[in-house]
Amino acid sequence: MTATQLVPPATETGDAGTRIASAEVLVTSPGRNFVTLRLRTEDGVVGLGDATVNGRELAVASYLADHVTPLLIGRDAHAIEDTWQYLYRGAYWRRGPITMAAIAAVDTALWDIKAKLAGLPLYQLLGGRSRRGCLAYGHASGADLPELFDSVRAHLEQGYRAIRIQTGIPGLGSVYGVASSAHAGVGGGTRYDHEPARRSDVPVEEEWDTRAYLRHAPRVFEAVRAEFGPDLPLLHDAHHRLTPIQAARLGKSLEPYDLFWLEDVTPAENPAVLRRVREHTTTPLAIGEVFNTIWDYRELFEEQLIDYVRSPVTHAGGITALRRIFDYAAVYQIKSGVHGPTDVSPVGLAAALHLGIALPNFGIQEYMKHSAETDEVFRPTHRFEDGLLHPGEQPGLGVEYDDEVADAHPYARAYLPVNRLSLDGAMHDW
Ligand code: CS2
Ligand code: MG
């Protein structure tokens, strides 16, 4: 090849056996909906990627099946970076959750294949192990303090070493992130899985009152510290519901209770407002579960306005893109805090764990535990021991998709809830 020739396209490189021979978009609903991309090379090596966007699943399935999978056939499965750029720059319509989840699925599946071809667990290709395991946090919640305390105790018994705290608010009905009393525990019949978009024709309507919340939150943390002592790392999610000045007040009022982080205090569209919050409080801030690209973080990193990055592999363009985000974050002493509710599939969680165990600036991993039905479909091999998550030693991601079990759980339309103000019923952020 002469110096003026273009790089050969990925369809002309690689051994014949490593070219992509098939690309399937798989939708299943073992209790909740998941979208998975499965790539297979000519030699029969299989890679999986998670493309689930909660409550909008079929949009990603169509983006992949109608516009992306036809482009993958014949490409060299080894050309991960070129394929990423081809799908991102090539589409012209960049960014956004649907596009980035689709690219993430392709990227993750290609890393799975590359690691299987190398005969290594994926984390070995990302630099190898940097720690014994990934510190996980679980979700404790309760309609009131006694229920919340029971839920915290149940999590401690399960070995969690860091716990997110959400509670009901006096005077309000159902509130996001709070399990009903029958489901406040974890494990077995009492597992907490409030987050899934509920199967219904219209979203459930929840109720909100910011003043009541701002009054109640510090009381809850005061009570939890009094009951469980000063050591336990505690987290809290404000779910994008506050104005900057309300967020500043919340951060300040929670300072005595030494939070590990306060998450998503303001809406994601205008991240620079966190300057205002930062001026007023030393409570550590986390954001990013609905961000999609490295550019969304630029001001936040360069001005050190946050402490933890919440993007998951699934919604930020895959392992390739998230690794770049974390490297950029490391320049500013900012750590990972990867999103891991049950709507991130076991494939997305496995990808996060392989990345997390290798990362120099790993912080914490959210871990809600998938249902037994979900694990029957995906057969994950990661382990949770003594509060730490381990990606396992299987070549690749360590996840296998069981078609027979998956097909027994067909897609069912489901929606995330919406949120209305108690005062006048106006729509509010949820
Ligand atoms: C939540 C999520 O885990 C979290 O921090 O904010 O459960 C979020 O509500 C869902 O993933 C939405 O799909
Ligand atoms: Mg959150």
Image (cartoon, rainbow, N blue to C red):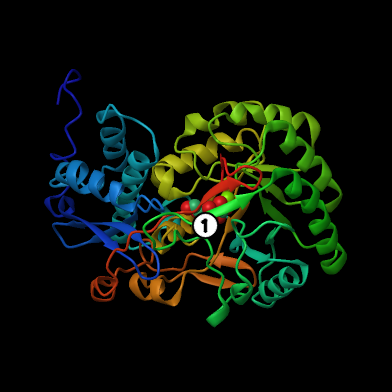
Label 1: state its secondary structure: loop
Picture residue at 32% right of the left edge, 57% below the top? 35
Residue 61, percent from left and from top? 26, 51
Residue 23, percent from left and from top? 19, 54
Task: Determine the residue located farthest toward the top in the rendered image.
Answer: 4
Picture residue at 48% right of the left edge, 57% below the top? 204
Could you tell me the amino acid type at mark 1?
A: Gly
Q: Is residue 210 above or below residue 94?
A: below
Task: Determine the residue located farthest toward the bottom in the rendered image.
Answer: 189
Picture residue at 18% right of the left edge, 24% below the top? 6
Asked if disc 1 is less than 8 Å from ligand 1, the answer is: yes
Residue 62, percent from left and from top? 23, 47
- In the picture, measured across the screen, residue 177 lies left or right of residue 46, that is right
Q: Is residue 425 above or below residue 345?
A: above
- Looking at this view, is 245 or 104 the one in front? 245
- In the picture, measured across the screen, residue 116 lies left or right of residue 298, that is left
> Dot 1 corresponds to which residue?
340
Q: Quadrant of residue 357?
A: bottom right
